Image (spheres, grey):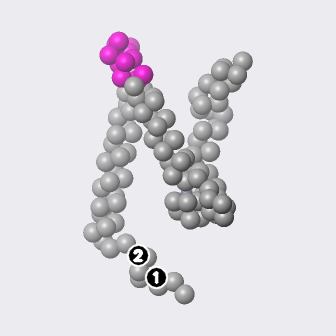
Amino acid sequence: MINQASTALTPARADAYRLLRDDLMLHLYGAEYHATKAETWTPDDEAIARELIPDLVNVLNGALLAHEGNCHGRCRFCRETWPCATIESLHRAVKDPKRQFITLVETVRA
Ligand SMILES: [Zn+2]
């Protein structure tokens, strides 16, 4: 039997997780803001975007690699049956036909 009390977050740890998540999301919102700002992009904006896109791809690749399946069919990070919830979420986002990932791949293959 699993001891429920041992798996619950303490209030301090929950606050720390929330602060970490909020900090990471602030960076992602900054990237999104850069891409969606209304003004015409300057050469500096384009240069930032050219560096930012590979950085974001590295973040996604890092998550994919961390959540690879092991030889027992389980995620080596979160121990769920593979594909775990993280891989399912990334798959939904990358394979969403309304996003540019699909368009880019079709353009490259054409
Ligand atoms: Zn996982």
User: Which quadrant does the N terminus fall into?
Assistant: bottom right
Q: Main secondary structure of the magenta part?
A: helix
Residue type at mark 1 is Gln
User: Could you tell me how many numbered marks the image carries?
Assistant: 2
Left or right of 67 in this view: 5: left
User: What amino acid is labelled 2 in the image?
Assistant: Ala
Residue to which mark 1 is pinned = 4
Asked if residue 41 lies in the magenta stretch, the reply is: yes
Q: Which residue lies furthest to the right in this view?
A: 110
Q: Which residue is drawn at 62% across and 45% down?
A: 91
Q: Which residue is found at the position 55% from the left and 47% from the top?
A: 64
Q: Name the residue under label 2.
A: 8
Identify the residue at horizontal 31%, vertical 67% (top origin): 13
Mark 1 falls on what kind of element? Answer: helix
Image quarter in which the C terminus is found: top right
Q: What stretch is highlighted in magenta?
A: 40-50
Residue at 34 percent across and 40 percent down: it is 27
